[in-house]
Image: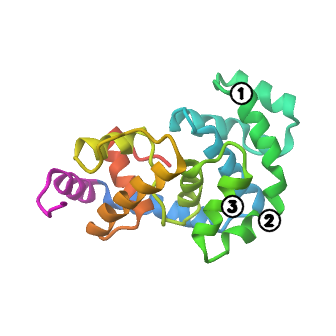
Amino acid sequence: MITSNDYLSRQIYSIKLEYGQKINERIMDFINMGKSDNYSLFIELSFCILTANTSAEMGIKTQRLINTGFIEYDLDKLKDELKKNRYRFYNKRAEYIVDSRFIIPEIKNLLLNKDHEYIRDYLVKNIKGIGYKEASHFLRNVGIFDFAILDKHIMRLMDENNYIDDVKLSTGSDYIKNELIFKKIARKFHMKPGVMDIYLWKIATGKILK
């Protein structure tokens, strides 16, 4: 049971005092990204494909270097650029990104759908390299804050605070089960899950990224 004076509450309160303004600015960045054109949205989707099983810093660095190359490069060129950047999974992720370009003309319209569960399920089912975590990450980064981004840092933090008893996410049903727990925590703090993630990621890693 989450109480108002537990350890996590004190940490969140401390971060709100010190970093609340910076976090609010990041939230506005996400909302503004959601108003971007199809090409910018696809570049952000490509970033989320890249972050699976690698660091957010590597994904950000690679996104900045390649940028419109996610749209313009042929497969071999994209592989070469990822490899040049020392990105570990350059073959598979390049294939995923190129295979996903079909969504470019429709991505903005997709995000206008009021059924956010449908959007996430569509991404998981149709975009290679996108699971529940990556789809949730992308949607948060374009201003849809309904979902939890259950990476290893967040799962470990939930485990350390006794909200879950297993940090592994081997199936989609595992993800949904732990996401329900995360959403309960977020409601306790009167936050949307995608906003709560920013606070918990700051607690877990000391960083405010995307």
- Pointer 2 residue: 106
Q: Earlier in the sequence, mark 3 or mark 1?
A: 1
Mark 2 to mark 1 CA distance (whole Å):
26 Å
- Pointer 3 residue: 122
- Residue furthest to the bottom in view is 114
Q: Earlier in the sequence, mark 3 or mark 2?
A: 2
Residue 100 percent coordinates (x, y): 78, 48
Numbered badge on residue 169: none
Assign a secondary structure to mark 3: helix
Q: Is residue 193 magenta?
A: no
Q: As shown in the figure, which amino acid type bears the numbered disc 3?
A: Tyr
Q: As shown in the figure, which amino acid type bears the numbered disc 2?
A: Glu
Taking the image as drawn, is residue 149 in sight?
A: no
Q: Are marks 3 and 1 in contact (CB under 8 Å)?
A: no
> Magenta segment, which residues?
1-18
Numbered badge on residue 90: 1
Residue under the image location 75 percent in, 27 percent down? 91
Image quadrant occupied by the N terminus: bottom left
Assign a secondary structure to mark 1: helix
Magenta stretch: helix, strand or loop mostly: helix
Assign a secondary structure to mark 2: helix
